[in-house]
Amino acid sequence: EEHLHIAFSMSDPRAVALLGQPVLKVVTEVFAKTSATISFLGVGATSTQLRSKLCGFQVELATQKVGPTACVSMRPDGGDSATALLSTLEIPRVSDNRTFTSVVRLTPEDQEKVSRLKNQAFGGILAASGLLAAASLVAGIVLAKSACARQSVKEAGEVKPDATEV
């Protein structure tokens, strides 16, 4: 559940002017921290990202009805100008019944970083599995040779004398 509390000082003439309007447009910057963990064979890789969006909505002051919120993404480096973003933000009317979905996506740099981390983790698991398989193979060969050598010694010691010899 989301809550937003807006307080105005009635001694401020700008607030009185805003509250005199039938519809109040509210624009705010929303900060989101997303975190995801992928785990494979007990090895986890976590990615966390901070993003911000410029969001706006309308409030019908007489009825206190709040309209849907629309957002535009801001660049992580803060390189967007507020004026440019405001010009692209289309704040829906209070009566607008459309649903607006805003998706937080990884930047290409963060996506590459997470992909590299995942590949390193899986590469490490594959390398460890390969080393264990090779060690098992070597141990199996050593045990097999040892068993063959013991069998040869055992057979050599069990040579029965020829019955024709006196």
Image (cartoon, rainbow, N blue to C red):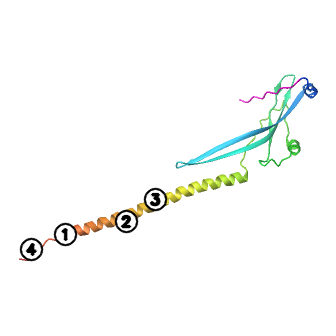
Residue where numbered disc 3 is placed: 132
Q: Nearer the viewer, mark 1 or mark 4?
A: 1
Q: Secondary structure at mark 3?
A: helix
As measured in the structure, the alpha-carbon distance from the residue carrying label 1 to the one carrying label 4 is 17 Å
Relative to 155, is 37 above or below?
Answer: above
Q: Amino acid at mark 3?
A: Leu
Report the predominant secondary structure element of the magenta stretch: loop
Q: Amino acid at mark 4?
A: Ala
Q: Amino acid at mark 1?
A: Gly
Q: Quadrant of the C terminus?
A: bottom left
Which of the two discs, 1 and 2, labels the residue nearer the N terminus? 2
Q: Secondary structure at mark 2?
A: helix
Q: Nearer the viewer, mark 2 or mark 4?
A: 2
Marks 4 and 2: in contact by CB < 8 Å?
no
Mark identifier at residue 9: none
Q: Secondary structure at mark 4?
A: loop
Residue at image coords 61%, 53% = 118
Label 1 Cα crowd, 10 Å radius (few <14 / some 14-19 / many 20+): few
Q: Is residue 3 magenta?
A: yes
Relative to 128, is 157 above or below?
Answer: below
The answer to which image quadrant residue 35 occupies is top right
Foreground: 77 or 69? Answer: 77
Residue where numbered disc 1 is placed: 157
As measured in the structure, the alpha-carbon distance from the residue carrying label 3 to the one carrying label 4 is 52 Å
Mark identifier at residue 163: 4
Residue at image coords 80%, 45% = 74
Which of the two discs, 3 and 1, labels the residue nearer the N terminus? 3
Q: Which residues are magenta?
A: 1-9
Q: Quadrant of the N terminus?
A: top right
Residue where numbered disc 2 is placed: 141
